[in-house]
Image: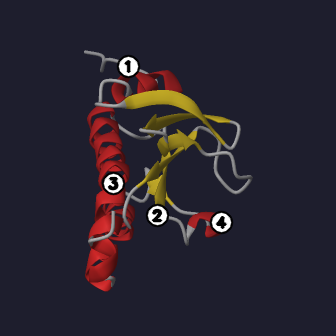
């Protein structure tokens, strides 16, 4: 009995999953195909020369990134260029469809809530500023 071949994951797959999320549009980032939520990039093909071919860069917080890297270093990785950015690199040739869906949702949530987090942090740091119109 043969094992069914796994469907190759490409940016078309990423696009299909990502565009099903609320407020997502397709665009570019650094000249590369990207997905954005309300104008903010949350996933794009990695274009830096240090990234491996067929890699996706997805915005996630640093704790989530560490968990992904520890759990599956054959799929998720990081290069020096990306260390200071809230992003994880994913090998599209290794990621499973369900994991990609979860990862894109993680990136969407990270970008969707980042503005709200910053507003809360500003309010805590500068209570008088929060009362200005």
- List the residue tagged with mark 2: 86
The alpha-carbon separation of the residues under discs 1 and 3 comes to 33 Å
Residue 120 is situated, as x and y percent measured from the top left of the image, at 26, 70
The alpha-carbon separation of the residues under discs 2 and 3 comes to 9 Å
Q: Secondary structure at mark 1?
A: loop
- List the residue tagged with mark 3: 110
Compared across the picture, whether 16 is left or right of 47 comes to left
Callouts 1 and 3 close, C-beta under 8 Å:
no
Question: Alpha-carbon neighbours of circle 4 within 10 Å: few (<14), some, or many (≥20)?
Answer: few
- List the residue tagged with mark 4: 81
Q: Quadrant of residue 127?
A: bottom left
Residue 92 is situated, as x and y percent measured from the top left of the image, at 48, 37
Q: Earlier in the sequence, mark 2 or mark 3?
A: 2
Q: Earlier in the sequence, mark 4 or mark 3?
A: 4
Foreground residue among 1 and 48? 48
Compared across the picture, whether 26 is left or right of 132 comes to right
Please state which of the two labelled residues, at mark 4 or mark 1, is closer to the viewer.
4
């Amino acid at each position: 009995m043969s094992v069914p071949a796994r469907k190759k994951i490409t940016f078309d797959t990423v696009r299909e999953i990502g565009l099903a999320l609320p407020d997502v549009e397709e665009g570019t980032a650094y000249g590369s195909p990207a997905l954005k939520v309300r104008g903010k990039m949350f996933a794009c093909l990695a274009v830096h020369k240090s990234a491996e071919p067929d890699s996706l860069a997805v915005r996630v917080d640093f704790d989530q990134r560490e968990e992904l890297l520890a759990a599956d270093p054959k799929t998720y990785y990081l290069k020096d260029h990306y260390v200071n950015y809230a992003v994880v690199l994913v090998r599209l040739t290794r990621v499973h469809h369900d994991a990609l869906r979860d990862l894109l949702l993680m990136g969407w949530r990270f970008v969707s809530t980042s503005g709200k987090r910053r507003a809360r942090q500003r309010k805590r740091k500068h209570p008088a500023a929060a009362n200005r119109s």
